[in-house]
């Protein structure tokens, strides 16, 4: 259910921001998402004993921004008790930006390291096939086919 709620917030962002603002919002939210791996942050956000205004100030203090839209977005999330959804929002926003820019990133999993020429060839072929800009990364792992 949290993904469905996150999609609604992302749709509002997409409608209310131009492309540059959307990328800026994504970068700032991504920076903020890194802090969500800390248990202390999650404890503060989940705590009913901490005032909403304190939570809002704390979250905003984690990102150095001058964007009024970003601050208002955090205020909106806080007012609706949705600060916990920021990682989900970042994930969905990345997807929406990729759709809007028609650029996608993927991983090629192989049991050997691919060279740049091989990766580039795959990127060009997939880009042509799907009429989109495709960026691929090579993940080398031990794949056994029986």
Image (cartoon, rainbow, N blue to C red):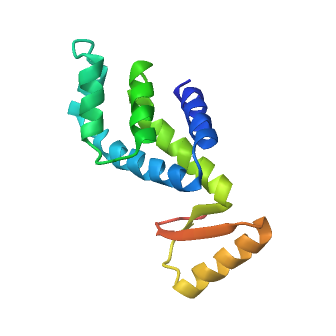
Question: Residue 63's quadrant in the figure?
Answer: top left
Query: In the rendered view, would you say 12 is above or below 18?
Result: above
Q: Residue at x 26, y 42 (%)?
A: 62
Q: Residue at x 57, y 45 (%)?
A: 17
Q: Position of residue 114 (x, y in %)?
A: 53, 80
Q: Position of residue 64 (x, y in %)?
A: 28, 48
Instruction: Decide if residue 112 is on the left or right side of residue 30.
Output: right
In front of the other: 71 or 42: 71
Instruction: Decide if residue 32 is on the left or right side of residue 12.
Output: left
Instruction: Decide if residue 117 is on the left or right side of residue 112.
Output: right
Instruction: Decide if residue 70 is on the left or right side of residue 62.
Output: right
Q: Is residue 118 visible?
A: yes
Q: Is residue 110 visible?
A: no
How many marks can you see? 0
Q: Quadrant of the C terminus?
A: bottom right
Q: Position of residue 71 (x, y in %)?
A: 38, 36
Query: In the rendered view, would you say 15 is above or below 125?
Result: above
Query: In the rendered view, would you say 5 is above or below 121?
Result: above
Q: Quadrant of the N terminus?
A: top right
Residue sitting at the far bottom: 117
In front of the other: 75 or 111: 75
Q: Residue at x 56, y 26 (%)?
A: 5
Q: Position of residue 60 (x, y in %)?
A: 29, 37
Question: Residue 45's quadrant in the figure?
Answer: top left
């Amino acid at each position: 259910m949290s993904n469905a709620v996150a999609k609604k917030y992302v749709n509002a962002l997409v409608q209310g921001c131009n492309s540059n603002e959307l990328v800026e919002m994504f970068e700032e939210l991504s920076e903020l998402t890194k802090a969500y791996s800390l248990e202390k942050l999650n404890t503060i956000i989940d705590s009913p004993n901490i005032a909403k205004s304190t939570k809002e100030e704390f979250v905003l203090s984690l990102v150095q921004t001058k964007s009024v839209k970003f601050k208002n977005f955090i205020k909106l999330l806080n007012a609706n008790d949705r600060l916990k959804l920021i990682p989900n929002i970042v994930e969905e926003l990345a997807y929406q930006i990729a759709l809007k820019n028609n650029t996608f990133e993927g991983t090629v999993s192989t049991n050997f390291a691919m060279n740049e020429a091989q990766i580039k060839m795959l990127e060009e072929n997939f880009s042509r096939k799907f009429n989109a800009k495709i960026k691929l990364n090579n993940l080398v792992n031990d794949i056994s086919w029986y």
